[in-house]
Amino acid sequence: MDMTYFDDVPGAEEPLDASDVALLARVAELSERADPVPEGLVERSLFAMTLAGLESEVMELMVLEAPAGTVRSDAPPLETRTITFTHERLTVMIALSPGNTPRTVRVDGWLAPADTLTIVLRRPDGDHRTTADDDGRFVLEDVPRGLASLLVEQDDVPITTPVIEL
Amino acid sequence: MGGPGGRRASPRPALRSWGAAGASGARDHEDARREMTSPPETESLGDRAAAALLGYREGRADAMSEFVREATPLLWRTVRAQGVPREAADDVVQQTWAALVGHVESISEPKATLKWLLVTARRAAWEVVRKGRADEQRRTELPDDDAETSATLPDPTPGPEAELLRDERDRLLWGALRQLPDRCQELLRLVSLADRPDYRSISAAIGMPVGSIGATRGRCLAKLRAVLTEQGETSWT
C-alpha cells in the first residue's frame, strides 16, 4: 500500500523542520529557474479575468499555431507575426505588423467562414471596433502595443481569444 | 449583444496589475504584499484565496489581484506537471483564472476556492494533453512515421540548460529531484509553493488522500536526501 512505499527511507516520518523548509525552498527555486513562469502571465491572467467579468458567456478560442516565443512578450514583436485561433464555429487568423506610428501595431485579420461580423479588440484601456467585410477581412490600424484580446460578436454568444501581447 | 457588462447584473471589478496602478495605489499594494509575505501562522494560501473571493464578490479587486499574483506559480506548476507545453500552459492558466470569475457565485464554500482552482487547472491540462496525443496519433498514422519514436509528448520538465545551473549543488539537487518517482516530484514542487494548511487542496488536485499527503511529503523529502547523500552531497543531512 501507498503508506509503506518509502518505509525503508530513514527519517521519513519526521515532521517538517527548518532544513526541510530550506530544501523545499530550493526545490521551488530550481523549478522556477528550469521552467520559469512566463513573463507577463499574471498580467494576462488579470486582464483575462477582467474581460471574463464583463462577458461571462464568452467562449474561448485556442491558439492553433504560432512561431515559438512570438505570441507572448518574450520576443520583441518587430517583424510580422501570424496567429491562428480556432473555435468550432469560427477560425480567426491575424497578421501583426508594425503600425504607422511608434509603439503601435497594425492588425490584419481574416474570419472563416467569411461573414460581416463586428470585431472588438479589447485592451486594458479601452476597445477598438471594426467590422469584417464580405470576404471576412478586417483591419485595425495603429493599435498600441500591449495586452489585447479579440472578441467576435456572433449570434448570441460572442467568441473571444486568449489574451495575447501585441 | 449589448455593451460590455450588459450580460450580468453586477459587473466584476477590473483587475489591475501593480505596474498599472497609480503611485498611491502602488503603495497600498506594497503594504498588502508585505502583509502577504509574512502571514500570521494560521493563514495559508487557501485562506487568502477565500478572502480574495469574498472581497471580489463585494467588488473589491485588490485582494484578488494579489492572490492571482501569489498563486499563479502554483497553477503554472500544476499544469506543467501534466506535460502541457509552455505555450498551451500559458493559456490554461489564463483560462483557469477567467473561469474563476464565472464561478465566483457558485463556489459555495470560499475555503474551497484554492482546491477549485487546482482541480480546474489540472482538468484543463489533461484535456490539452489528450488533444495533443490525438493529434500525435493522427500524425504518426502517416506511412513513413515511426510511431514508437514520435508518439511521445514533449518532456514536461526539460532538463535545464547547463548554464542555468552553474552551481554544482544546484545540479546535484536537480539531478536528485529528477530521480524521484514522478508523483514525488509533482508533490514536492507543489508543496514547495504552498502552506501546510493547503495540503487538503493540493491532495484533491493531485488525487492523493489528504491523510497521507504530509507523510508522503516527508518520505519524498527523505528520499531526496537519500539520493543526495548517495551522490556524495552531505550538506543536506
Image: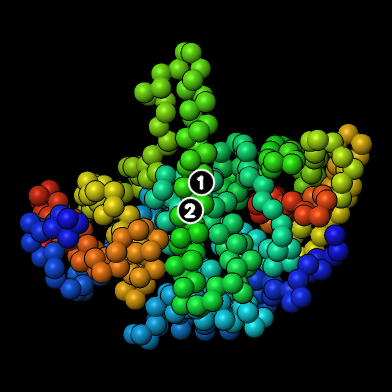
Image vertical order of residue A13 relative to residue A149, above or below: below
**What residue is at 29 percent from the left and 52 percent from the top?**
B183
Furthest-right residue in view?
A134
| Residue A88 seen in this snapshot | yes
**What residue is at 77 percent from the left and 54 percent from the top?**
A157
Which percent across, then down, holds residue B174? Answer: 27, 50
Which percent across, then down, holds residue A138? Answer: 86, 42
Side (left or right) of B7 relative to B114: right
Other-residue count near label 1 (Cα within 10 Å), few / some / many at <14 / 14–19 / ≥20:
some
Image quadrant for the N terminus of chain A?
A: bottom left
The circle on residue B127 is: 1
Q: Which residue is mark 2?
A: B123
Q: Nearer the viewer, residue A72 or A94?
A: A94
Asked if the residues shown at circle 2 and circle 1 are in contact, with their CB atoms under 8 angstroms apart, the answer is yes
Of the residues shown, which amino acid type is indicated by label 2?
Answer: Arg
Of the residues shown, which amino acid type is indicated by label 1?
Answer: Glu
Write down the chain letter for disc 2.
B
Write down the chain letter for disc 1.
B
